[in-house]
Amino acid sequence: MPTVLSCEALEKRYGATVALGGVDLEVERGELLGLLGPNGAGKSTLTKVACGLVRATAGRAEIEGAPAGSAPARAAIGYLAELFRFPEWLTADELIALHQDLAGSDGGAAERGELLELVGLADARAVKVAAMSKGMQQRLGIAQALVGSPRLLMLDEPTSALDPVGRRVVRDLLRELRSRGVAVMLSSHLLSEVELVCDRVAILVAGQVVARGTPAELARPRGVEVETGDGVRSFPEARRDDVPRIVAELVSSGQQVYGVNLLASTLEDAYLEAVGAA
Amino acid sequence: MSGALIVARYALREAVRRRVILVVLVLTVGFLALYGLGTAVTFNEVNSLAADDQLDDRVLAGSTLLGLAMFTILFLGAVLGVFLTLGAVRGDAERGLLQPIVVRPVGRTSLLLGRYGGAAVVCAVYVAAVYVAAMVITGVAGDWWPDDPVGPGAGLVLGVLVIAALSLLGSVFLSSTANGIAVFMIFGAGLAAGLLGQIGDALAVQTLEDVATVSSWVLPFEALYQAGLHALTEETGGITGVIVQLGPFGGAQEAGAGLWLWALAYLGLVGAAARAAFARRDL
């Protein structure tokens, strides 16, 4: 898969404060990367450097081979900031139209209708931003980020103001985008959301990537639990391959086996482990 | 459409939708009505005075009234220009309005040009229109017209554009409130320096004249305003000319082509500084 976003030894310092301390990261076409980390870990800074909003102190960030912040790089991205606001005097349709003009998109009314439909705002075309709830504005933000069919979508906490239904809409949307080959970098504190939708996860702590991999790779085996007639028995060191032997031994010792659970840590466990160890 | 034009159109639409234009128009109608009343009453009084061979009361009244109007127009134009630009960069960035636009391919230079262009069009049209209205009111009420009807208005327009450019430059570094305060303080300092220059000219105090000269280079909007006042009665001689030029609403300083060129170059320099600073600014 071609690489859409590539960061190499990326550093950002604000005086003595290190926001990014040499980050290496890649996002491939059609990949959904989850960016996790505690507050102040550097997630938003990394996203902003990739968008060209913040200049890196050292290192390299490229979008489809073009330096981050250059015109070709900006033409390839869609972005929704964590803290954003849209002009309150614009309607949803006018806001998307403005971004079509800014992005050089010739999608016209058809694109506007499709994007508002995608985020569930088809009935709110004529509603002014001032009259929208925070959740509606966040969905509108996602729609504006999709103007011009970006190849890389960078979303910073895109579901923080959404209700469960809204989050599901966004999850489905992200899966749809992935199927179309759009790369997505999703920064979030909602680990369950990331676990549900992301192909890979990178955990940032103090400006450095301390763990990365698929959610399954980051999860750790935590043993086996067997439900027997005498209650639940735990085998903390056991793995999947040990299950037939354990069951056979229990049965041969006269116990009745009703069920077996393979225990694995969640992404949350992996996250807390990575953050705690850093 | 170029990026700057898109942003300028957006800025103009914002000014209309947020009722900036409406509020300004309503208040300006009030100002012009008040000015019309004052002008009519003043010329009635002037007409009732006995004729003076040495002093032309009509010229004195007309130029002073229009000079007063020019000061008000400069102030109103400055308010408009500052409020349309004071939050263009840092203010909008702090509110989260700027980032979604900056990441688009239009680029930061186009964004600055567009924001300035939108504000400049609004300010230029406003200042020119109010100046013409004030001049016509004065002419109709008192049958007095400035010696140079165009130069003073053009000077006011360019002066307000300079103030708006300074406000845009300040917006790269300062939050909206701090920038607004800073620009109005600069505006006040410029006017004070101009008044000092008039006093220096009347009393022949070289130090005060030097202060005015330096300030006119550093803050050319004041020099443009002074030159505009001068142009109102540039062909008026005798005691009337001397008294009018003593001020406070008569200008002693002639502009010359150098001032106009410098003001245009100043705009370019301020724009280049804003562009360079914005290009390096993290958002």
Image (spheres, helix red, strand yellow):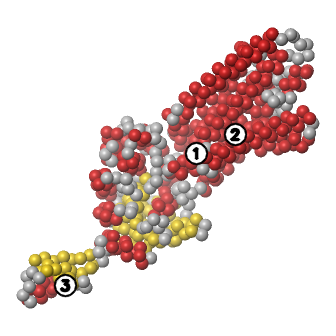
Direction from residue A109 to residue B157 in the image, left or right: right
Describe the element under mark 1 as helix, strand or loop. Answer: loop
What residue is drawn where x is 81% and y is 30%? B248
* Residue B275 visible somewhere in the drawing: no
Describe the element under mark 2 as helix, strand or loop. Answer: helix
Q: Quadrant of residue B158?
A: top right
What residue is drawn where x is 69% and y is 21%? B35
Characterize the local packing of mark 3: few (<14), some (14-19) or many (20 or more) Cα atoms within 10 angstroms.
few
Percent across and percent down for residue A97 are 43, 40
What residue is drawn where x is 75% and y is 23%? B66
Q: State the residue in front, B52 or B108.
A: B52
Q: Quadrant of residue A229?
A: bottom left
Chain ID, mark 2: B
The residue pinned by badge 2 equals B162
Chain ID, mark 3: A
> How far apart are labels 1 and 3 at the CA level?
65 Å
Characterize the local packing of mark 1: few (<14), some (14-19) or many (20 or more) Cα atoms within 10 angstroms.
many
Q: Is residue A160 above or below residue B118?
A: below
The residue pinned by badge 1 equals B88
